[in-house]
Amino acid sequence: MDFLPDSIDEYARNFSSAEPELLKELNRETHLKVLSPRMLSGHLQGRFLSIISNMIRPDLVVEIGTYTGYSALCLAEGLSEKGRLITIDNNRELRPFAESYFARSPHGSKIQFLAGNAADLIPSLPDQIDLAFIDADKENYSRYFDLLIDKVRPGGFLLADNVLWSGKVVQPVKENDQSTKAICAFNEKVNRDHRVETMLLPLRDGIMIIRKK
Ligand SMILES: C[S@@+](CC[C@H](N)C(=O)[O-])C[C@H]1O[C@@H](n2cnc3c(N)ncnc32)[C@H](O)[C@@H]1O
């Protein structure tokens, strides 16, 4: 969900760098051919991910939740010369789609797609992660944080998407709404964790910015 009025959202996009042509095409093809295209980060959030990655110039980025590859391509824009990005998704059917776009990107050779359940794969990832982006099943956000935090280098960052969950985090939570409960628990958990600093950025559906001290 977007919280900004359309006119402000449009103004913000107009005064942010243009969406690269390859990402425009990926965005369009996702909307035409893939279920739930609203999961894709999109122009404004994509430029945010790109500029954050360019600020950090990471050697290692880990993404949980590839979908069609939009955010992976944005994050890859800031990789250092020798940098690499590992992106994980348990939907194997998305792999050919995402990889066809990675192959056409100047950063594509730095991106590795791992197919499988994130909680099973994270323990085998390398240490010294500079930047992690959590954007998969909401019920497991806290688990992903716990699995990733020791692998993130001191001074490194984690970003978590959808932490405002269409505003449900500030409404009475329905008994059977496990996703909202999980997002609320995640936000409280990371905010209380003394190993990190947090800033909840109300961009699009909310991005939690977490810096490991
Ligand atoms: C919101 S989409 C990711 C969007 C993408 N980051 C972007 O901005 O373009 C979430 C993705 O997480 C994947 N996913 C869900 N549960 C998962 C799990 N347990 N392990 C790995 N991937 C998972 C889904 O298949 C889906 O493609």
Image (cartoon, rainbow, N blue to C red):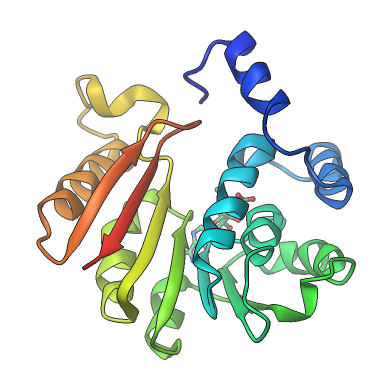
**Snapshot quadrant of residue 156:** bottom left
In-image side of 114 versus 68 (left or right): left
Identity of the residue drawn at 90% across and 67% down = 104
Residue nearest the viewer, comparing 159 with 48? 48
**Snapshot quadrant of residue 112:** bottom right
The quarter of the image holding the C terminus is bottom left
Residue 121 on image: x %, y %: 46, 81
Q: Looking at the image, how many numbered discs can be counted on the residues?
A: 0
Identity of the residue drawn at 42% across and 26% down = 166
Residue nearest the viewer, comparing 176 with 163? 163
Residue 65 on image: x %, y %: 55, 60
Residue 203 on image: x %, y %: 47, 32
Identity of the residue drawn at 73% across and 39% down = 17
Question: Can I make out residue 32 in this image?
Answer: yes
Residue 114 on image: x %, y %: 61, 79
Identity of the residue drawn at 71% across and 60% down = 73
Up-down: is 54 above or below 161? Answer: below
In-image side of 83 versus 61 (left or right): right
Q: Where in the image, quadrant-wise, is ligand 1 located?
A: bottom right
Residue nearest the viewer, comparing 103 with 185? 103
Up-down: is 152 above or below 189? Answer: below
Question: Can I make out residue 36 in this image?
Answer: no
